[in-house]
Image (cartoon, grey):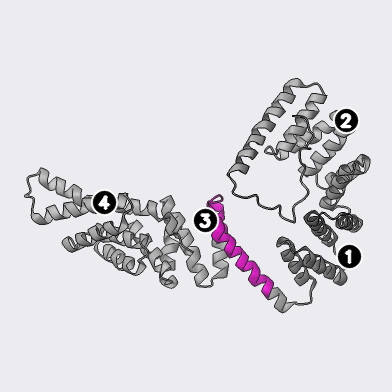
Amino acid sequence: MSVRGSISAMVSCVSKSVLMISVLLVIFASVGAPQTSNSRELERYAEIGQKALEEGRYPEAEAAFEKLRELSPATAEVHANLGAIYFQEKKFDKAVGALRQALNLRANLPKTEALLVMSLSELGKYNEATPGLEKCFRHSTDPPVKHMCGLELLRAETGLKQENKSVALALELNRLYPDDPEVLYHTARIYGNQAFLTIQRLSQVAPDSVWKSMAAAEAYESQGSYTEAVGEYHRVLTLDPDRKGIHYRLGRTLFAQSRQINSAELKAEALKEFQQELRLDPSDASAAYELGEASRSAGQLEEAGRYFEQALNFYPDFEEAHLGLAAVLMSQSEPKLALPHLQKAVTINPEDEVAWYRLSRAQKALGNDALQQKALSEFHRLHEKTLQQSRVKEQTLPTPPNELTKQVIEPNAEP
């Protein structure tokens, strides 16, 4: 893992300290101090180095600051900036030496201390780096520095095989930076590795257990290996025929497989599994919902309504079931009965364009023109937002196999 992609902001913060040299020279000149050849050289190389840093020309900045180090070896800021440049250039061994020298000359350089421990981490010296990274992450008030130290701490704890600590830190990083792609990438790797190790341990301690087969089935399902997943779910049912939830998961997998290869036979098998799940567990709202949506799609409105109502009896905040039942009632010319289900749906999920669209149709049917326009306006806003998001995506991610069948706006729906 590398956090060098976000180092520029930190280098910018640290590099500004070199201006102290030029500022001091200006102060000396203002009080009539003689301008020596050494001071002129200091000022010249400081200007060259600062300009090179600002423009991202790190080799030139490195040369200038190395010259400054020769001219002013007792100036902590020179060593600090040089260490930051070495870090940016991935010369971590040199960065460690320069940053340590800076801190020896002046201890209160917090960003320099952070760069030092991150350089140690990049060199794989995790034991030495971890205490400083922990301090930086917990106490830094500089957002970019805190972010970088958190990622390097995750790297260090992973390198030290401190699985419990790295998982806890990954959870904290996700809480602090829920939309940061770099954090999401690295924490996903932590979770994936931990899951792999846990499943591996399960296979060792209980290779013939229900739990091992359930874990294998879910892993296969998440990978889209539906045939293998179906086999493992059948194995679970062989070991424990009355286990609740397995027929639903088996049906879900068969349903996904039927969509993948457009198989009516597999879809029929999936529906049988959902029905079997309800025989074992009438409270399984997901199984009832899938049967309801399949019945609605087939035009079997009475049957669909019963399944949706069954789902809502056990799961009153099931948004998709409210939308499904409302669609059935609208098809039966019962907009007044559909209205409370649609109002509930938009309360549960105000960002669902399907809910607002169907609400607008119900309000129109009831003659509530102002409320219909309000709902339709909200639908258009959310629909445009959806279109914009789809434009910026480089590719459309596949629907996860364990997703419920989502309610959609019918192709022939009125605008």
Question: Are dots 4 and 1 in contact, CB under 8 Å?
Answer: no
Quarter of the image containing the C terminus?
top right
Of the numbered discs 3 and 4, the one sitting upstream in the chain is 4
Mark 2 residue type: Glu
Question: Are dots 3 and 1 in contact, CB under 8 Å?
Answer: no
Rendered residue at 33%/67% (across/down): 96
Of the numbered discs 3 and 1, the one sitting upstream in the chain is 3
Nearer mark to the viewer, of 2 and 1: 2
Q: CA distance from mark 2 to mark 4?
A: 73 Å
For label 3, count other residues whose C-alpha is less than 10 Å away and answer few (under 14), some (14-19) or many (20+): some
The span shown in magenta is 171-200
Give above or below for 163 relative to 20.
Answer: below
Q: CA distance from mark 3 to mark 1?
A: 44 Å
- Image coordinates for residue 76, horizontal then vertical, percent: 24, 60
Of the numbered discs 2 and 4, the one sitting upstream in the chain is 4
Nearer mark to the viewer, of 2 and 4: 4
Q: CA distance from mark 3 to mark 2?
A: 50 Å
Of the numbered discs 2 and 1, the one sitting upstream in the chain is 1
Q: CA distance from mark 3 to mark 4?
A: 29 Å
Q: What residue would you read off at disc 1?
A: 242
Q: What residue would you read off at disc 4?
A: 50
Picture quadrant of residue 193: bottom right
Mark 4 element type: helix
Mark 1 residue type: Asp
- Image coordinates for residue 382, horizontal then vertical, percent: 66, 35
273 displayed left or right of 177? right
Q: What residue would you read off at disc 2?
A: 334
Specify whether residue 280 is painted magenta: no
Give above or below for 160 relative to 147.
Answer: below
